[in-house]
Amino acid sequence: MMAGMMMAPRIAAAKAQENLSRVDALIARMTIEEKAGQLNLMNDPFRWRPEGINPGDTFDSDQAQTAADIRAGRIGALFNGVGAASTRYVQDMAVKESRLGIPLLFAADIVHGLKTTFPVPLGEAASWDLDLAERTARAAAVEGGAAGVHQTYAPMVDVARDQRWGRVVEGAGEDVLLNNLFAIARTRGFQGDDLTHWSSLVATPKHFAAYGAAEAGLDYNSTDMSEQMLRSVYLPPFKAAFDAGALSVMSAFNDLNGVPTSGNKWLLTDVLHGEWGFAGFVVSDYTSEQELIAHGYAADGRDAARLALMAGVDMSMKSGLYIKHIPELVQSGDVPVERVDQAVRRVLMTKAALGLFDDPYRGSDVRTERRVTGSREHLDLAREAGRKSIVMLKNEGDLLPLPRTGKRIALIGPFGADKTDVFGPWSVFKDMALAVSLEEGVRAALGDDAHLTVVKGSDVEAPLAGGIEAAVLAAGDADVVLLAIGESSEMSAESKSRTEITIPDAQLALAEAVAATGKPVVVLLRNGRGMELSGAVNGAAAILVTWFLGSQSGNAIADVLFGDHAPTGRLPVSFPYKSGQSPFYYAHKSTGRPSRPTDREFTTKFRGVPNEALYPFGHGLTYAPIRYSAVTVSSPTMTRDDELTVSVTLTNGGERDASEVVQLYIRDRAASITQPVRLLKAFKRVTVPAGASVETSMTLKFADLLFLGGDLTPTVEPGLFDVWLAPSAQSGEPAQFTLV
């Protein structure tokens, strides 16, 4: 056993050295144009089209130019094309028809599935289930690899604390720990155990860095923050992904403290490679190096190429600036050829790590592609992921779960029968044939005796003629209303920032009219961010947050609605009382005038709104009431060498077993750098049998108390700490201990 364990590193090191020798020999033979070509990433015009490539003599102009560039060694990678049938054809251009035969790297935006689509990343983060995230990423990689893809532009690991930002939907929410853990799980899932296997994709955490902190939640906007905040909150998820093995990273669109990230040498070279020892390559986001001009940082395209390359961007996406300008930049002496060689080496070493020099056609088997794409196994996983991502915000009078018989149900809202929008944003390659609508899921659950009426009521952002009247009529004839409302994927995605994170007016009017009938209402909220819920929406008896759940959306929701599975999700983002609280997040600082329930004036709060969330981070109910006892600690003091055991007893007052996510938070009461009012340090899922009590404990270590001091090094200081074991970031009473 010991010998076997010791052999693997030597074999890996030997293979790495073999790859390096191979790559350096190639670089020595390359012209400067061929080197620039390896750093040039362009759209795949062949495998993008559903019908695939055209025969050679019928290429359109884009295909013809791309083919010529590949054969001339002017393109090193293509993105957002899939398909096993045509992979070999396209790869042949590089391997058999270019001078050096260097294989192409095929990349794609496989963010939450390929053909089988899983919940959007924010939704999946609501599962608080890391094993699930690794399994869905693995399934996505299997389908992507079978379609001839080598690299995915995921996971997105931007901490997102302003729900106005459209790209909240792509990440794991507002908390650092949750982002760290999901970054690790998804990276491992995408890359698998063996990068040379056809089912492994190079993970590309994005967007480096602090993109999620854009001013006013406005996409592409500037970010300005202290280095302390950057290193405490926004950089750790990237480091976690790199430590898990990610071999690429995508630079961001935003500028950071006045320097655009795609031209930021301190970030892309000093921190990334110097401090962290990152061995992979940096790819720009779509034309982000060209956008250095619009930022006012570069004078022109030549200057932008120089600045980006010298900052540490190794591969240029789409702009064509590298292939256009690198040869002349090297000839003029403005860019050292050693820097070009360094970038090429990083790209080629990644291709070698994928095994492309040994098998450039990996993943181009049509039979494998047919077998794994949309497989029963993947669809079952999508259904499991969907139901585990659902969060129940409220359930007055135990309205849920609904009985399967004896109830007339009205399904009302623009998302009741909808099949086109179940996937959510960044579902680039979705298969509509795999989509299950909410109506289909409910009908399948109810069976042949279903008493179900389906009325649209309104469009997503506009009223329908006669829509409200039809909805009121249907609600009046029903025993219970399922109100399927919220955002479309066009409202929650890249470039979809919102000033008001509310339900659109047309749907609010629909909700008010339905509520006026007096029938019990279950809101089924479709969304990609934390939202302001008000009026009849928040007044509904029950609310389920259903995000965008992917291919099996309807079945997953029905599983929870009718009690086959209890809701187990917890919020990864805060739902504020009002949009104007944005950015709102639980781990905020206290201020010198903290808001208290009894205070009326001169404290930190908006007029008429408490300084807290309507539904806080970590909140989520299930089909049994869970009561928490007082929290206890194993000792009133803790030293550097101690571990503190924190315990609580959970009591299930219901008739069903319950799955509870117990969350451990701390607060450092007095520190040389002010600390958040709470900070998540661990969580644990605990099953509590019906009518029973279960004691559960978690361990707090000295390392859990560290924070970045004024000199930006991890430190901890003696003093009093609060510690909670609680069901959310806004509940429970803490115990105390003193670090001595």
Image (spheres, helix red, strand yellow):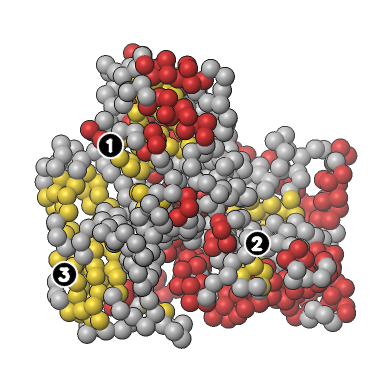
- Identify whether 587 is placed above or below 533: below
Tell me the SS state at disc 3. strand
- Quarter of the picture containing the C terminus is bottom left
Residue designated by label 1: 395
Is residue 107 rendered to the left or right of residue 325? left
Q: Given this view, does label 1 or label 2 mark the residue nearer the observer?
A: 1
Q: Quadrant of residue 343?
A: bottom right
Q: Which residue is drawn at 45% across and 72% down?
A: 232
User: Mark 1 or 3 closer to N-term?
Assistant: 1
Is residue 738 rendered to the left or right of residue 184? left
Q: Which residue is drawn at 34% across and 46% down?
A: 569
Q: Say the numbered circle drawn on residue 253.
A: 2
- Identify whether 127 is placed above or below 645: above
In the image, what residue type sits under mark 2? Answer: Phe
Alpha-carbon neighbours of circle 3 within 10 Å: few (<14), some, or many (≥20)? Answer: many
Q: Say the numbered circle drawn on residue 633.
A: 3
User: Mark 3 or 2 closer to N-term?
Assistant: 2
Is residue 240 rendered to the left or right of residue 278? left
Q: Where is residue 677 in the image (x, y as percent from the top left)?
A: 33, 67
In the image, what residue type sits under mark 3? Answer: Val
Q: Where is residue 412 in the image (x, y as percent from the top left)?
A: 44, 24
Q: Given this view, does label 1 or label 3 mark the residue nearer the observer?
A: 1
Closer to the camera, 15 or 540? 540
Q: Position of residue 86 (x, y in %)?
A: 71, 42
Q: Disc 1 vs disc 3: Cβ atoms closer than 8 Å?
A: no
User: Mark 1 or 2 closer to N-term?
Assistant: 2
- Marks 3 and 2, how far apart at CA: 46 Å
In the image, what residue type sits under mark 1? Answer: Asn
Q: Disc 1 vs disc 2: Cβ atoms closer than 8 Å?
A: no
Q: Where is residue 263 in the image (x, y as percent from the top left)?
A: 69, 71
- Quarter of the picture containing the N terminus is bottom left
- Marks 1 and 2, how far apart at CA: 41 Å
